[in-house]
Every structure is written in C-alpha cells, then in structure tokens.
Image: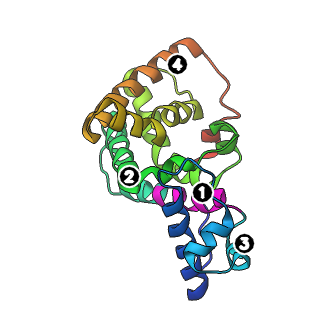
Amino acid sequence: MTMAKKPMRSDTERNRRSLIQAAVKLSSGNDEPVNMTEVAKVAEVSPATAYRQFSSVDDILGEYRFEVGCRMRDYARTLDTVGLERLEELCRCWVGLVVEHGEAMVATRSRHGYLERLREDTYYLTVQAEALLEPLQQSARELGIADIGDEALFLWNLLFDPREIFDLLNTVGLSAEQVGTQLFAALRGALTGWATARGEQDLSRSWSNGVRT
C-alpha cells in the first residue's frame, strides 16, 4: 500500500511546490528535454536547492503524477458503485484528470515497463493501481472471466496512457466524454480477450497478490 509521507517544513514544501509548477510549465507541450537548471530558474530557487528536493526532472514529474493519482484514489473512496459501473466511473475520472492537468502528464514516461515498475512499488503507479484493482477484479467476475491479476492494470495503463488520450482528443477530435466511452469499451474487450487467450495462470508474482482489497 502507499506509504504516508512525513510532514515537511513550510519553506521546504513551498520550494517543492514551486519546482513542481515550474517543471509542469516547462514540460507542457515541449518536445525538447528540460533540465534541472531551467526548472530551478523558473521556480526561482538555486540549482542546489532543486537537487536537495528532487534528483531529476523525471523525479519532479513523478511527484506530479502521484498527486494526480491521489485525486483519482480519493474520488474512488467517494463511490458506492461496484464492478463495471465503478470501473467506468474511474476511467472517466482519469480522462478528466488528464485533460485538466494537460500535456505535462505525457512527460512522465520511463524506459522501464509498467509491470516492472508496479511490482517494484513505484509510488506514483501504486496509488492509482490501488483505486483500480478491486473494480477490475469485480469486473472480471461480472464478465465471467478469470482474474488476470496485475495484467488487468497493464491493459488499463496501455489504453489510458495520457499520450493516447490527447491523440484521441486532438487528432481524432473526440470529446472527453467520447474518449471515456470508447476507451472503456476497448478495456472491456481487452480484458475478455486477454483472459481467454491467457488461460490459467500463476498469480503469485502479480502485484495484486500482496494487496488486500
């Protein structure tokens, strides 16, 4: 489960907020790599201060992604629906958050695969996965298919990648509501197809194996 963070001094928290805002501003719609010196300048802190708070721009954007994931988790806690209905509500919530927080969401990418990072408990992924795991498991039962463990989260991540959401919005011209509808329908099909082709499997290595739902 996601660990609670210790309270920070007000000046430390202020510097972190400034660095996150600066990194988001510089990364949004920018195809060129952003470095820590540039972020520190926009945040009006020294590079040394920036490096005391974060190890890299990717680290800053990971914190930003975590905060967005926390909003999805908190929204999930307000829902009284279950299964496919709950899953659809969370999918639409995520599309809305991606639209709200802009293209800086696209910049939080890694050379390592999703499942590798999830099983290593990468904090900005686990907070999101905790919100999705139970409704994915419940949805599998509703669909009459086997529980595929964290591979269901893998499929969700593939379909709900912010880059692809913006592609559907900007290139195809779908509305956010249409994107949510289409991707949720695709997720249902993907879960069924994956579980059918996968057959019986060992879930002992699945991230979901160690999570209480």
User: Which region is colored magenta?
Assistant: 56-68
Report if residue 88 is visible in the image: yes
Judging by the rendered image, the residue that carries numbered circle 1 is 62
* SS class, disc 2: helix
Q: Which mark is residue 51?
A: 3
* SS class, disc 3: helix
Who's the residue at 58% across and 50% down the image?
A: 126
The answer for how far apart the CA atoms under marks 4 and 3 are is 44 Å
Residue 167 picture location, percent across and down: 41, 35
Side of 181 where 33 appears, left or right: right
The answer for how far apart the CA atoms under marks 1 and 4 are is 31 Å
Q: Mark 1 Cα within 10 Å, few/some/many (few <14, many 20+)?
A: many
Side of 170 where 161 appears, left or right: right
In the rendered image, which quarter contains the N terminus? bottom right
- Identify the amino acid type marked 3: Tyr
Task: Reply above or below: 14 against 177.
Answer: below
